[in-house]
Image (cartoon, rainbow, N blue to C red):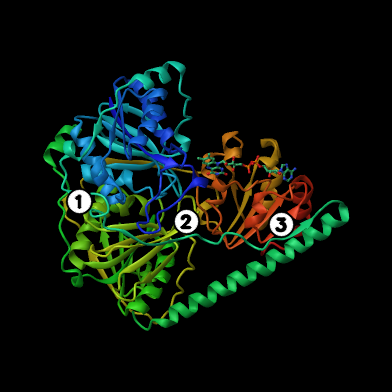
Amino acid sequence: MRIIVPIKQVPETKAVKMDENTGTIIRDGVESIINPLDLYAIELAIQLKEKYGGEIVTLTMGPPKAEEALREAVAMGIDTAFLVSDRVFAGSDTYATSYILSEAIRKQGKFDIIICGERATDGDTGQVGPGIAAFLDLPVLSYVNHFVDYKDNLCKVHRLVEEGNEILTTTLPALLTVVKEVCEPRLPTLRGKKRAKKLEIPVFSNEELKLDNAELGLKGSPTKVAKIFRPKVARACKKLTATDEKSLESSVAVMIEFMKRKMFIVRSSNTKNNMEQTSKKSSILKNLQTVCEQSSSVEKKPFNLMSNYKDIWILAEQFEGRILDISYELLTRAQDLATKRKTNINAMLFGNNIGDQEINKLILRGADKVVFTDAPELKFFLPETYYRCMIDLIERFKPEIILAGATSTGRTLMPYVAIKANAGLTADCTELDFENETGNLLQTRPAIGGNIMATIKTPEHRPQMATIRPKSTPKALPKNERKGEIIRITPPAKFLKTRVTRKDLIKTEDQIPLQNAEKVVVVGRGIKKAENLPLIKAFADKIGAAIGASRDVVDRGWLSYAHQVGLSGKTITPKLYIGIGVSGAIQHLAGMQTAEISIAVNSDPDAQIFKVADFGIVGDLFEVIPELTKQIRLFNDLMI
Ligand code: FAD
């Protein structure tokens, strides 16, 4: 098995600096590390080599200093490494980066599998893995959390999705992006370190790659950084101390009142915004060699006639024939933009045998037209079938903007389609607006672990594509009188060919998926041992909250990785976050600071978590939580 592992060197999150003029990261003088999520890709590659034999090659694109990351990977057990480095590559966005890396991979010959980390902790987009797959025309299996086996050129994996674990098979070559749960990275050995020190690492510049300069760096990047700024994260925390029985009782009572009041305000304001927004609109393969030899680089068509592109589209999602909430959240975002732009809102939906009544829900909530591509092969998301059908719609309808959820589907499909459509994509947008002078979409998103906000635009490519975090927007409300058009499309058989097969879905133990939960109780190392978790679960059950965890809790095996909140875990945007025995390390805050209401319980009055909390109790969680559970029962306060 010949395995390729593209990796990235990233700055230490806290030490980040950005060039205000170019919007690029200043790496000089900043301590750099190997992207923590790439360590899992490296480890899985080593385990596969140990089991099936073969060779592992790693590569990275970056300045000469990025060679350090390659040597670290070699010290862990990777065989060979090369650096892709040239000044003309600087400033590349995810599109140009995927292009350069895919060409570098193509140049070094035959391979069976590419393994990438889920995302890099600096850019935090997760787009480069699917982007490389799109350029090399490979199937992409994202969010892989278990590699089952490899036999007769078929590999079987589990993929982490919102509903649980999908069991998928794919023929090789293919590209996997892996999450932390997939394995436990090993430490470099002394022998490995010695080998890494001596290993000659060739550098590929553009003299070797021979790519057109216009396709590289800032010039070759569809997305441009319009503005960067620092977000405000500090909140005015109302902190009470529970030292004795009396202060414990009273501070818990105040906390419950606080939660009730705040949740009421948040819910009312969401409903009001929702109604206002709704009323604004009146209508509205055998081996890779074969693949790579047959397909040269993706055809790059310039989209000169930008004026041909119109309307705001959403990628609606369904599961087992039921339209998912993210679709309605996207309609709210689309309504806001459509009002400003005075355009229609359309939805694209892929699935099988969904009735008009279900599809009509999208129209009642704001879509003017729903284009439903219907085939048994589209019942569940598969990268190849979905991307071909989506490209077909882009060619037919020429959407000016496409919004999708930052879900396991949206975060895989959108980067793949963006490459195939020669379009720009911005992940995890928190704000969308239009640039007055040009009408370009301004897409604002957190970057570098939430330390920086970047506003991105796509001036010369259409469609402009963006993903939006689930639960960051209220659902559009239905209006019974709304009318719209449903267009049903039966795709041709050639669109439905796939190298990936979905075998099954194992639903997970989580009754409330963390990322979609309105209320989340996050447990930190302060809980001391797994045996104490029932205390937290009892409280979470009382208020109908999902359970999240800090990395330390996951690393100790007290809760599974699916619960991890933070930079290398999930980003959550619940209405209510309650951190219990969580210190509030910057990497944890990166995953929760967009929560609407944040509450902390910690025995350390100076814990960082209080800086991002609206309300906090300084006290022993083993006293505070039982009291909280008791008082909530006492007040019959299940409706927080
Ligand atoms: P600690 O920092 O040990 O904090 C425990 C807290 O519990 C303390 O504040 C303490 O005062 C409090 N406490 C103790 N006993 C009690 C008690 N009886 N009652 C009340 N309070 C009590 N971390 C994440 O969470 N998510 C990530 O995704 C993540 N990604 C990372 C990525 C990288 C590259 C790196 C380097 C680190 C990452 N981390 C992440 C780890 C992070 O830096 C912290 O180590 C981690 O968040 C700490 O977890 P904690 O708050 O549970 O533990």
Q: Is residue 509 visible?
A: no
Q: Amino acid at mark 2?
A: Ile
Q: Secondary structure at mark 3?
A: strand
Residue 628 visible from this viewpoint: yes
- Quadrant in the picture for residue 444: bottom left
Determine which of the numbered discs, if any, sits on residue 145 in the image.
Answer: none
Residues under numbered marks 2 and 3 in contact, where contact means CB atoms less than 8 Å apart: no
Query: Which label is found at residue 616?
Result: 3
Q: SS of the residue at dot 2?
A: strand
Taking depth in this image into account, of 586 and 548 the one nearest to the observer is 586
Position of the C terminus by quadrant = bottom right
Q: Are marks 2 and 1 in contact (CB under 8 Å)?
A: no
The residue sitting at 23% across, 30% down in the picture is 111
Q: Which residue is mark 2?
A: 452
In the depicted structure, whether residue 518 falls above or below residue 71: below
Numbered tag placed on residue 215 in the rendering:
1
Amino acid type of disc 1?
A: Glu
Q: CA distance from mark 2 to mark 3?
A: 26 Å
Q: CA distance from mark 1 to mark 3?
A: 51 Å
Image position, residue 240 (x, y; %): 77, 58
Q: Residue at x 28, y 41 (%)?
A: 500
